[in-house]
Image (cartoon, grey):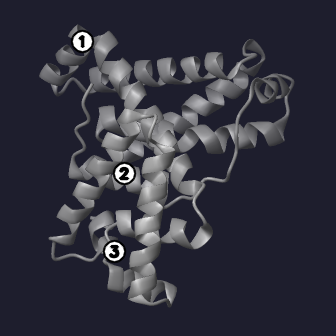
Amino acid sequence: MSFSVSMKIYKVIIKYLFLWPLKNMILRDKHIRQIAKGDVEQFKMFYEIFFQPLCVFSYSILKNENEAEDLVQDLLLIYWNKKADFETVDSARAFLYTIAKNKCLNIIRDKKIHQKYFDYILNNEEVFFMNKVIENETYTILHQAINELPAQTKKIIRLSLSGLRNQEIADRLNISVNTVKTLKNHGYTALRTKLSDNLHALIFLSILMNQKNRLWRTTKTPEEYLDS
């Protein structure tokens, strides 16, 4: 499997998985069983954990951010209505990605456009969606690894990946450029160590860093670029 991250998808990944910090939350089977009994607080955690990755997954297929968000919101409501059917994280995750896949296909089919793209997905459905799920799980693993970094290092890595240069990060955080360089190097070293057993995540981190360097060569600020 290989990753291919376009600039458009890069922007969406940065928005969902880096600019919206995720709390240190670990979902376990016991939480799924509590949700099945109607525990609203546990469902809020469930929603926060799955919303961002599912948005990236759906966007990577639909290529439309608003449609992806609407789809995921509907999907999580469907899950809540069927919550009593699930007892494990794996069964919940499988349900979410399966329904997301089917909803994406329905949207593409209903538009009656991009027929070649639709035919390609149908003809390669199993491999296509398995790759998308693997990619999406990789985004989440990388995001969690970044979220485990020390607070200041985490801020620097996020700002760096969103396209800010060292001086811009220093100005924003009111620290020296040397501090930015030092903590950024420590951060990337720590990430490579954390992800050493996950080749996909290491490759994906390298791709994001490469896209960040391409972003630096644009004339727009990172904020202008991400909003474009």
Q: Residue at x 47, y 73 (%)?
A: 183
Left or right: where 113 falls relative to 175: left
Give the quarter of the image for residue 189: bottom left
Q: Amino acid at mark 2?
A: Val
Whole-angstrom CA distance, mark 1 to mark 2, is 24 Å
- Label ID, residue 124: 1
Secondary structure under badge 1?
loop
Q: Residue 96 got which mark? A: none
> Does the residue at mark 1 contact the one at mark 2 (Cβ under 8 Å)?
no
Which three-letter amino acid code belongs to the residue tagged 1?
Answer: Asn
Callout 1: few (<14), some (14-19), or many (20+) C-alpha neighbours within 10 Å? Answer: few
- Residue 185 point in image, percent of width and height: 40, 67
- Write the residue at 12% across / 20% down: 116
The label number, if any, that marks residue 164 in the structure image: 3
Query: In terms of sequence position, does the residue under pointer 2 or pointer 3 come before the other?
Result: 2
Mark 2 secondary-structure assignment: helix
Query: Seen in the image, is 36 located left or right of residue 132?
Result: right
| Residues under numbered marks 1 and 3 in contact, where contact means CB atoms less than 8 Å apart | no
Please name which of the two marks, 2 or 3, marks the residue nearer to the observer: 3
Q: CA distance from mark 1 to mark 3?
A: 38 Å
Q: Which residue is under mark 2?
A: 12
Q: Regarding mark 3 in the picture, which secondary structure is present there?
A: loop
Chain-order first, disc 1 or disc 3: 1
Question: Residue at position x 41%, y 21% from top?
Answer: 101
Q: Position of residue 100 (x, y in %)?
A: 47, 25
Label 2 with label 3: CB-CB less than 8 Å: no
In the image, residue 110 sits, relative to residue 7, either above or below, namely: above
Task: Using the rendered view, name the quadrant where residue 41 is placed.
Answer: top right
User: What distance separates the C-alpha of mark 2 from that of mark 3?
Assistant: 17 Å
Q: Relative to 48, is 151 above or below? A: below
**Kind of residue sitting beneath label 3:** Leu
Q: Is residue 116 left or right of residue 86?
A: left
